[in-house]
Structure formats: structure tokens, C-alpha cells
Image: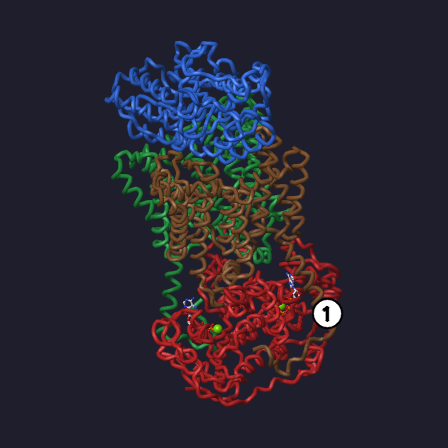
Chain colours: A blue, B brown, C green, D red
Amino acid sequence: GSTGDDAAATGGGSGTASGGKVGIDFPRADSDFWNSYSKYVPQMAGELKVELMNPTNSQNDVAKLVANTQALVSQGAKVIVMAPQDTGAIASTLQQLENKKIPVVSVDTRPDKGKVYMVVRADNKAYGTKACEFLGEKLGGKGKVVQLMGALSSINGRDRAEAFRECMKTKFPGITVFDEPTEWEGSKAASMLQTRLEQNPDIKGVYMHAGGVHLAPTLQVLKAKGLLVQPDDPKHVFVVSNDGIPQEFDAIRKGEIDATVSQPADLYAKYALFYAKAAAEGTTFQPGPTDHDSTIISLPNGLEDQLPAPLVTKDNVDDQNLWGNQVK
Amino acid sequence: MSTATPSATPSPPPSAAPAGRLRAGAGLRLGRFRDLTLVPVIVVLLVVGAFVDPVFLTVGNLTNVLQQQSALALVVLAEAMILIAGKFDLSLESTVGMAPAITVLVIPATAGGSGLLAIPLCLLIGAAIGAFNGFLILKFQLSAFVVTLAMMIVVHGLHLGLTGGKSLFELPESIMYLGGATWLGVPASIWIAAVLFAAGIVGLRYFRAGRALYAIGGNPDAARAAGIRVDRVLWTVFVIGGALAALAGVLETGRLGGISANQGVGWIFMVFAASVIGGVSMDGGKGTVLGALTGVLVIGLVENVLTLKGVPGEWKQLVYGGIILVALMISRVAGGKAQD
Amino acid sequence: MSTATPSATPSPPPSAAPAGRLRAGAGLRLGRFRDLTLVPVIVVLLVVGAFVDPVFLTVGNLTNVLQQQSALALVVLAEAMILIAGKFDLSLESTVGMAPAITVLVIPATAGGSGLLAIPLCLLIGAAIGAFNGFLILKFQLSAFVVTLAMMIVVHGLHLGLTGGKSLFELPESIMYLGGATWLGVPASIWIAAVLFAAGIVGLRYFRAGRALYAIGGNPDAARAAGIRVDRVLWTVFVIGGALAALAGVLETGRLGGISANQGVGWIFMVFAASVIGGVSMDGGKGTVLGALTGVLVIGLVENVLTLKGVPGEWKQLVYGGIILVALMISRVAGGKAQD
Amino acid sequence: MSVHVEARNVVKRFGPTVALNGAGISIAEGETHALLGRNGAGKSTLVSILTGLQAPDEGEVLFSGEAAPALADRDAWRRRVACVYQKSTIIPTLTVAENLFLNRQRTSGGLIRWGAVRREAREVLERYGVDVDAGALAGDLGVEQRQLVEIARALSFGARFIILDEPTAQLDGPAIERLFERMRALREQGVTMMYISHHLDEVYEICQSVTVFRDARHVLTRPVAELPHEELVAAMTGEATAAYQPRSRTAGDSVAISATGLSLRDRYQDVALEVRAGELVGLAGSGSSGKVGLAETLVGLRRADSGTIRINGAAVRPGDVPSALRAGLGFVPQDRHREGFVPLLSVAENATLPIAHKLGGFGTVSPSRRRARAVQMIEDLDIKTEGPDQPVGDLSGGNAQKVVLARALSDSPAALVVINPTAGVDVKAKQSLLGAVEDAVGRGAGALLVSDELDDLRICDRVLVMFHGRVVRDVPRGWSDQQLVAVMEGMEE
Ligand SMILES: Nc1ncnc2c1ncn2[C@@H]1O[C@H](COP(=O)(O)OP(=O)(O)OP(=O)(O)O)[C@@H](O)[C@H]1O
Ligand SMILES: Nc1ncnc2c1ncn2[C@@H]1O[C@H](COP(=O)(O)OP(=O)(O)OP(=O)(O)O)[C@@H](O)[C@H]1O
Ligand SMILES: [Mg+2]
Ligand SMILES: [Mg+2]
């Protein structure tokens, strides 16, 4: 029962070449994951022959995102690709874009309200669940783990945290979880983890919400405590990360951490542009499985393509299909 | 008094008088334009913008810029008044998010008729925060800077705690209205900001209470000795400041259609930048609301030009900061006076 | 004083004199301890912490707290000196990330022997930023607040631009060493912070140059009249401040094992909070390095206690801000003097 | 005798103001040379040039025939000249000891020896008879004590040339006498001094020669002995000026200011006083007698521990300035810099602050009416300013003081309290200020004039003398200087 693509469909389904300029806003310039994403965008645009405008950057500020969107529209954008890190405060903008019949592809986050043509994201709840299941099994269902959370104001951070907590409670009730809100800051992560290890030297697992900011501090703290040892050592602390950046893969290879959820930066870029082009051409999609190992699900305000986010462990870390192995 | 000059005092020597008057004229003219040292900067930005993109000088784009800046502008208005009175308020930025958020928690979207109370309630929350700041600073004699720094964290903490960090998007119509409505073809928020700035300019220039701010900021002891009820005036300014920040929150909420847990966070730097490059002194007693307004415009125009130009994200900050530095220097040269 | 009053002045009546001396004495004694108004707060925190968790009072935990705060402490030291001299530097927080990042770009991990130059180069970059700030503020006579606000954006912008916003993981050993090493069982960063704070305390108390900061901050005209080279001293302070921020960046880099694009971002609020609750005045001329250190400790202890207690994330900010407010009040009551 | 210090053809401008216009001075070795002139004549500007704080726009400064050092070489300047500036150069956040030895603290191995600094500071304070705790914060001192510290500091340098810019404006009789003793001793040691004051009798007492500036120019230089009083005043003002004649009047029946049973711990005890309409009452007392504290209580700047105050018959709320103003009070505070004016605001605005509510309806202030009032005040009190829009902070000291008096008189007060109104004010301005006070009294106001200056007190109908916090005598008009001083010093009961 999808109604989300009516606006786009009115554009006329007969378009052949690219149907107009695509405006794209990057959410921030200071995170490794998003920097990889913004590197992939022009590359994919070339491959998909998308007419891309000069990208804007909203520096993690929804007010800037709104301003940038307005500017892109004034400059003639026919489709907007955005990644609203703040999913509530974008509603008015989506409403205005709908009024102007400009379809929106939302990457990484699902706006709470307002029409979207397609949401391209991986399931952040699944990240949390995968991390929980991995840690739970490794720890044999008991012990203590620390969750280095992102910011409370971030939907992705909240999704990961809730899913992780929920899964631990139902599937591994014997495991104690310490939640540490780090505001995505490495410095806070290091301090909190250090303090928690002091208090509970028997902590055996860590789930980090963002490898980009949490990886180095976590390794550093474990090293200082002499806990950075191979997985077969009884002192080993099991670490699951999230993002899938090359440094995480290196750490997995070295046995310093055990797994990461690879959030597919390349696929985000590719399918964001793919759907943007489709929107410009007036194509419509239906819920159901796709040709690229994912499923489109129906939302009240549009559709969502849930891209696969594989759990990377020592076993599959050298898989060349992982985006983290393609950048250097 | 006035009339009876004692005969012992002769009138000043004829030679000195005309010279004195002439000089007075020059001083006056300079004084008039001291608020407007950013005008050359604005002109430069308009010209540069026109070259960067033809869209820039369209009514639509400039209206967008004004609308985007209107909420920030209200906070700048509040901060400028507080700075002129010689105090600080860092907590305004947290009020921008917290006041509407609490309002929405109290009056949910489904409230019906009582939804009309949303805006008054929101302003009241802002005013209450201002009053509490004033209480701590004036009665407890704490430093305004640290008190409002702590309050910035507390107020935002309340917002986070009560909303659980979630964005709110089921909002009563009434609180959404102002930020989105258009009156006579111009966004309501621009009207509101314009009216309030006009009131601020007139109030601080032609009203006793407004002049009292300058006296207090310039020398609180002298102001007290001149019969100004310093504490009462300061308290009022904090209350008005809080209410203005809450109103800014309402405009921002309506414009964005939702209240994120980050609404307002980080604004205070821009607020201070706008006020201070607009000529408002951090030491109190100096500057005007009009000057602060030019500061807001400069910041809005810089952001707009950078967006239109499509400066890559990783270089944007550098360019942005660089332009502000240059703006500072231009205004310094235009104003001719050392800043502080 | 007191003894040889010239005979022309009748000695004060016996009743008044002791009272007068008493007051002076009390003032003096209070003056001594005015730096230490936060000590009761620290004691309260230690007691509360001990109740919250038995781990709190262990050597290991307290060492952790000190180590976690050491980088911030260096920036606080820098800011305290700058504030005492009556100026501002907001750009320090950006230097914390930018100086080591640029260093690593210039001297990559693979540089071998030249890797030893990493720390000197990093300090030099910090000093250069400070020197540029000083240049703009002193020679161009711009307001320190806005200049360093703009520079905060520019310096961070350079960091973002040159690294492309990426975290840097491949670091030369030499730059990692200080933040991670342990000397005589105590983290090197604690030693470094301790030595520099000791130097700061002694320097600002027992050296003419240090006293000159107070004179300049208290009344720059009077300082100039007393033969103090005001501009030179201020410039030096900005340069030292920049270098200290860069050193803080080195410690932080070593502690975290990498340089994220956000390193240092947002610190400045904590830096001001620590300085000002520690008794350093935003108006200049007042406060001590020791006081600022107590401010850092309070902030570190509060964070540690909150972490140990495991306050839920969404309420943490509120509790944190609330504690700082209470700390302010306690120190106000202990100090007995109105703050500014 | 050789010339020790010389300034030639000095021009100094501040924006549109020409503070010195080809003025010069030549001071012989070992003499004490007075520099006189009306407020704003450029005296302090010359001081800042002679001490190397500012460079002249034109002209040169010579010390013993040699060109002055470069502006940046502060140490060279400090070896040549020490100075008590008119504007306080005390750093309020530092202790008295440190202020005395700022930037020349005794060190060993680079470290400051605080014990030695404090000891030397105590010595200096003792030597100059300053009764101040060396460990006290300078900011906690009163104006008077601060001034004494500045003087002690300048004299303690051991410089061969000392400038004193209005050092006595805030001092009372004995303190001035002590200063003069020190100056005489220094002169015997061959120290050259330049002395600026608006008290001409002081000039006759300790100076050998005198230079007069008028309107930024040099007018004359003459040995003091050859220059009669009237001629000196004429040189300063550019015209013959008659000595001030106190007026006589009869007090009315209604009471303008009354106080009963006022006490404030450590300041004054159990004071009662009454000033009737049309009466001008003096309040005198030596240092720390409590007179200023009492006056400040009357106007609401301080709150008494007990007792009541009535202004025009209305009881005023203790410690509340607005309520005193509403009752019809005008006042001049003791320290114009601290409580007198807002430096950044214009003359017009400062002068009309208390009457802002009368300059427009509905809470507004009409700038044109404000200006008109201010122009009138500027004329009445002969304030030397570029115009009503000039910030008071840019005025010379005496003119700023006039603005403060203008403010006190702005509301045709029925009761007036003026504290040291003529501090730092030139002869003619003094006459016009006292004239303005007498005018107000003539129009029926009751005035209390608190002053250390016998000249000011002479216009009073009677003088209340305080001693150690109590009003000890009510001296009717017609006293002689010795009589009054004796009472003030508690020598006579
Ligand atoms: N920094 C300044 N900016 C503008 N004008 C100034 C400044 N300093 C002095 N002036 C002006 O220069 C003139 C001379 O001032 P100066 O202080 O030298 O007078 P003065 O003779 O010392 O007067 P007084 O007896 O009142 O102290 C005055 O008109 C004054 O307003
Ligand atoms: N801030 C203060 N705190 C405590 N005592 C003070 C303070 N200022 C002045 N005093 C003391 O109060 C007493 C009365 O002071 P007051 O200023 O009223 O007298 P005064 O006659 O004007 O003295 P002076 O001529 O020295 O100013 C004196 O002993 C003085 O030292
Ligand atoms: Mg002078
Ligand atoms: Mg006195």
C-alpha cells in the first residue's frame, strides 16, 4: 500500500535521459564515515550519469540543512538527496518540497514526518541486535559489557542503543550493560571507558556506536590497562564496532577488536543517486525484495530500501566487496 | 533651575564658542554612523553574492536569508540588550530549544482549544528562565558568565531529560503557525523580527528604560546614584531576553516543523559574533541594536553566499571564519575606533 | 604602617583602631584563601564520590581523573593567564586538534628520525596561532573576543580542510608517547600538567612578568605608566597560550590514540567554566592559576562521579549543570565576595 | 640655574580637540614649578607627554638639554621622571604593597621576594605618613587613601624630577601639610618638581615659579613672588575676576533635610541634624570622621543601621536612592569616577539622567529636549565641552565634575547634598559651582555641603563639625581657619 511516490510519478514516466539536476546535501564534514560517503557520491554520479549540482554541507545542523535545501531549490534542483541527522525538525522542509513537487531521497535516517520518495539506509536497530548477539555468544551469556553510545539527539544512536539493550535483556539477561553517552566524542568515550574499567575490571565486552570516533580511544584505554590481547587470551575484551572503516578492519586483522558492522558508505551513495535519478525520471517502486540483496519496505510517508549491513569478523574481513576494503 | 546664572560667571569668550560648536557637529556625525560600520561589508557581500550566483539577488533568495536568520536575530536582540547592560546570558541558546519543547510536552498537539495557550506558555517558560538567571546573578551575586553557562547546561539538560533526547514533531498548530505563515507575501517571522528590532532600536534610543541599560552597562554605581533601580532593570532585561529566546524557539520550531533535541545548541557563538561584530561591546554600555542587526545580516549573507557557491564542506568553515575576520577588519577601518 | 603616624594626626580613638586592624587582618587572611573557595566543594565531592562507589577513592580512579583532565587543564592554564591579563582566547580549543593534526600531515608516521621534531613543530604551530591572534588584537586593535571567535572557526576550518575531515590514525611514535607513557608509575601527562601548573603558579606569583599580567588585566593604562611593556607581555601570553593548547593536543592525541576532526571542539566552555568557577575573573586582573586548577578538579570529579553513578544519559546534563550551579553557590558562600 | 626639563612648541590633538597648541614649559633645576590653568587648559595632557605616555603631535621634550627617550623605552622615562597622575593609576585588584612597587618588586634570582616588598612598602607608607595596611587590596581603599598611596609611590622612586598632577584634590588639611613637608625635604635634596593644583594658595606656599596655560597655549611664566594673586587669576581666566563673595540669606521655616538617631557601625553614631529650606549647612571633619559616610547615608547610597531620614518632610526608604530623589533631593557623590558619571554617555545624557522622566511622555526621552536642557546647563555652569553629545569620559576632570553638579541641580532640588563639589575644579569654575549651589539655596533649597576645603565651607551659613563619628559642634558663620581646624582636629571642645 504505497502512496509515497505519487508526487514523483506526476513528473511523467516517459523520461529517458536524466530528468534534471540533483541537489545533494552532506550532513557533516568531520566524520570518517560521511567523508567516505561524500567521496563516493561524485564517483557514483559519473557511473550512473546523474546530473549532480555542487554539493552543500550542513555541518550537522538542521537549520543549515534547511537553508541549503532552499538554496539548492532556488538554483534549480529537481531532486534533493539529504541525510537529515535530525529527523523531527526537517518536517516543514519536506512539506515545502512536496508542495513544489520536488522528490526527496533521505540517506541514513528516516524522517519522522513529511513525504520522502525513498529512504536509503541500513537498519540501525539491526546493528545493535547484531552486535548484541555477537557479544552475547562470545561472552557465553554472562558478564559485563560497556556500550559507548552516540548522542541522544541522534536517531541512529538511539536505535542502536535501544536495540542493543533490548536484545541483551531478552536474549542474554545474564549480561550487565553499562551505557555511556559519549556525544560522539572520543575524549568522553576514553574517560568513561577508563572509569568504568576501574570500577569493574571484569568488563569483558564493548560495543561502540561509531568506529570513527570510538575506535582509537578504546584501543588506547585497553592498551593502557594491558587488556589489548589476542582473542584466545582469557584477559581479552571483546569489542564490536560500527561503521566499517578501514582502521576497524585492520584492528580486526590484528585481533584487537572482534567485529564491526559495516555500514555501507558506497551503497548509500550508489542507491541514493540511483533513486534520485529514478525519481527525476518518474519511476515508481513497490515494497518487496530488490535486485541488490535488500528489501523495500513501506513507511507511512514513503518507502525505505533497507540495504544490507554485514557483520564483519575475522572470517570475512578480507572480502573485497566491503567498502572499507575499497578505500585506502 | 536653568535661568538664574550668577552674574559672576561671564559667558565664554567669543573665540572659543564657534569652534566648539563646529567640532560638536563633527563628533555627532561620527557618532551617528558608528553603528553602521558593517554597512560597507554588507555592500561588498551583496556585490560578491551577485557575481557568485544570479539567484543571489532575487527577492526569493534574500527573503529566504532573512527568514533563516529571523530566529537567530531575536536571540541576538536579546543578547545585545543584555550585553549593553553589562551582563551575559549564555543560556539563551538552550531556551530556544527547551521552551517550545516543554510547551509541547505540556500542551500536546491534540489539546484543541487550549492549544492557543502554547505561545504564551512558551514565552512564560523563557521568561521564567531569565528570571531565574537574574535571581542567581543579582540576589546571589554570582558571575553572570558562569551562572548562565551552568544554566545553559541545566536548561538543555532539562530538555534532554524530559524529551529523552527525542525530536518532537507532533506539535499544536498554534505553535507551528508563526514560523511558517506568510503575511502580505512576506514570512511572518520576518515581520516579527522586524517589529521587535524596531521596538528595540526605538526602545534603547528613546526610552528611559532603554537609556538606563547604557547607564548601567557603562557604570552601574553611577546609574544607581542617578536613581536608576539597577537590579530591577537588569532583572527585566533577563526576563525579556529569556522570552525573546523562547519566541525565537517558536519561530524556529514553525520553520523546521519539529523540535530536535539540538535546537538552539551552538547558537550562542553566532549570537555573540553577530552582536560583537555589530559593535556591541562585551564590556557593557556600548553598541546599538541596529548595529547588532547588521551583524546578523552579515552572518546570514556570508552563509548564503557560501552555500550558493557550493564551497566543499571541509573548506567551508575556513572560508567562513576567514570572511568574518575580513569583515571585522573592514568594519574596524570603516569605524576608525579600536574595538573592545 | 600603624606605628609612626605623624603627630599632626591624632591617633584614632582606641575603640575604632582595633576594629580597623581587625578588618584589615580578616581581609588579608581571606585574600590568601580566596583562591581556594572551591576546596569545600572538592571535599564535598570526594565525600559524595566515596559514598557513590567504593572505587572512587582508589588511587587508580583518582589517577584516571587526573589523567583525563590533564589536557583540558593545560588549556585552562593558558586561558587563565590570558583572562588574568584581561583578554580572551576562544581559538585555543581549535588549536588542540589542529596543531597535532597539521604536525602529523607534515611529519607522517613513517618519517623515522625526523619524527622527533613532531612535538617541537606542534608547539610551534600553536605558538604561531597565538602570535597571529596577538597580532590582530594588538596591532589591528580588534576585539579579542571576536578575533579569537573567528580564529576558532578558521583554525578548525584549516584542520578540517587539510585533513579532509578524516580522523588521523597513523601517528609518529614521538607524538603518541607523552599522552600514553607512565613515569614512576604515574601517567606522564599528569607529571607534565603538574610541572606546568607549578610553573604557572610560581611564575604568576613570583615573577615580575607574571605580576605584570595582573597589572595589565587590572588597569592597562596604569600598567603602561608603571613601565610594563603591555603589548609585548600580552603577545607573549597569547603565544604561550597557543603553545600550551598545542601541548594539550599532543597529550590528548596520545591518550586517544588518534586525532579526530573534532578533537578539542566544544572544550572552550569547560575551559571557561573551570577558570571562572576557580575564581578567575572575566574582567581581568583577578584570580590565580591555583584557583583555576581547583576549577578543573571540580569539573573532573563531577564527571567521574556521574560516570561511576551511571546517571542515565538523558539526565546527565541536567545533573551536571545543577552540580556546577551548586558548586558556584558553595564557593560564593565560602569566598564571601560577590563574583564578577 | 640650568634648565632641567623643557617642552617646546608642543601640539597635541585628540580628534577635533586641540589639547595643546604650541605650548611649552621650562623648569629650572631644583625648583618647584607650578603649572596652572583652567579645567581643560591642557595641563594633564602636558603631563602625559612629559612622562612619555603619549607622543606630542609636534614639538619636543628635553631633559637637561638632551632629547627625551623613545616612547617605547619606558625604563629610561622612569629614570627621568616620576609622576602622580590625575587619573588613578592604582590597580584595584592588587595589594597596596604591590601597587607601590609595581614592576620594580625586589627580586633575588628573578624571584620576587614578597617579604621584602611588603617590608619596603610599610617603610614607604610610614615615611610618607600614610596610614594604610600594605597588605590591603588597593580597590578596597577610599579615594583619599588611594591618592596617598599614589603620592607615596611617586615620591619613593628617587627620581630627580617629579610631577604631581592635582595631588591634593582629594586630601584634607593635615594630609596636604604632610605632603608639603615631604616636598620641601625633596627640594632641599635638589629634586625638581612640577606641581599642578587649582588651589592657588598652595602654589604660593610651596612653588618658586609658575607657568600658566590658557586655551591650550602658554600664557606666562614668572617667579611666584612677582605675581600677585589677582594677576595670576587674570592670567588663567583671561580677564579680571573678583574674589568670591559669600552671600547672606535667611533660612526658611520648613525643614529640607532632617536626620535623627542615625548610626552606622564603624562610621558614625547617633547623628541628628536638620537643614532648613534656604539654608546652606557645611559638614566638616578630618579624615575618617565619618562625614562622607553620613552624607552618603542621607542620599541613600548607604543604609544606616538605625535612625530615620526625612527629605522635605517625607520619610525616605533607607538605602534607596530613587526614593530620596523622588522626595526632591539632588546630590554630588564624593568620587565622580565611581558614582558620578557614565563615561561613555554624553554630557547631555549624564546631566539629565535623574530627570529623564520629565523629558518626554510615556517613558520616552526626547533627544531634542534633552539637548536643549543640556545646552542650558553647559551654559549655566560654563562646562568646556565640544557640545552636549561629547562623552563625559573625554572631558577634563574639572569639567566632568561640573557635569556631575549639573546632574544634581537638574531637577531644581529642594534638598541638596554635595560632597567635595570643587575637587579638581579651577578657580573660576569653583566660583560658578559654589555660585550654582548658592543659587539653588537662594531659590529655597536646603543644602548640605560636605567638604575638606575651608574655602567651600566659608559660604555656609553654619558648619557642623564631625569628630570620630559624632557631630561635635555647630559653628556659625564667621569662624576663622584656625578655629575651625582646631575643632575638626578635636583640639578644642
Ligand atoms: N583622551 C582624550 N580624548 C579626547 N579628548 C581629550 C583626551 N584627553 C584630553 N582631552 C581633551 O583635551 C583637553 C585638555 O585636557 P587636559 O586633561 O589636559 O586638561 P587639564 O588642563 O588637565 O584640565 P583639568 O584641570 O580639568 O584636569 C580637554 O578639552 C579634554 O577634553
Ligand atoms: N569601605 C570601607 N569599609 C570599612 N570601613 C571604611 C570603609 N571606608 C571607610 N571606612 C572607615 O569608616 C570611617 C568613616 O569614613 P568616612 O569616609 O565616612 O569619613 P570621612 O570623614 O569622609 O573620611 P575621609 O575624609 O578620610 O574620606 C573611617 O574610619 C574609615 O576608615
Ligand atoms: Mg588635568
Ligand atoms: Mg573624605
Relative side of C41 to D3, left or right? left
Give the answer, above or below, for where D418 lies relative to B327. below
According to the picture, the residue beneath numbered tag 1 turns out to be B18
Residue B300 place in picture, x, y as percent: 57, 40
Is A272 or D352 nearer to us in this picture? A272
Where in the figure is residue A248, as x and y percent of width and height?
Answer: 44, 18
In the foreground, C291 or D299: D299
Q: How many numbered marks, from 0 up?
A: 1
Taking the image as shown, residue A127 lies to the left or right of residue C262, namely left
On screen, residue A281 above or below C277: above
The chain letter for the residue carrying disc 1 is B
Report the front residue among A320 and D271: A320
Residue at 53% over, 44% down: B183
Question: Which quadrant is home to the N terminus of chain A?
Answer: top left
Residue C84 appears in the picture as rendered: yes
Q: Which amino acid does label 1 sit on?
A: Pro
* SS at circle 1: helix
- Which image quadrant for residue D181? bottom right
Residue D84 visible? The answer is no
Quadrant in which ligand 2 is drawn: bottom left
| Point 42% across, 37% down: residue | B259
Q: Position of residue D400 (x, y in %)?
A: 59, 68
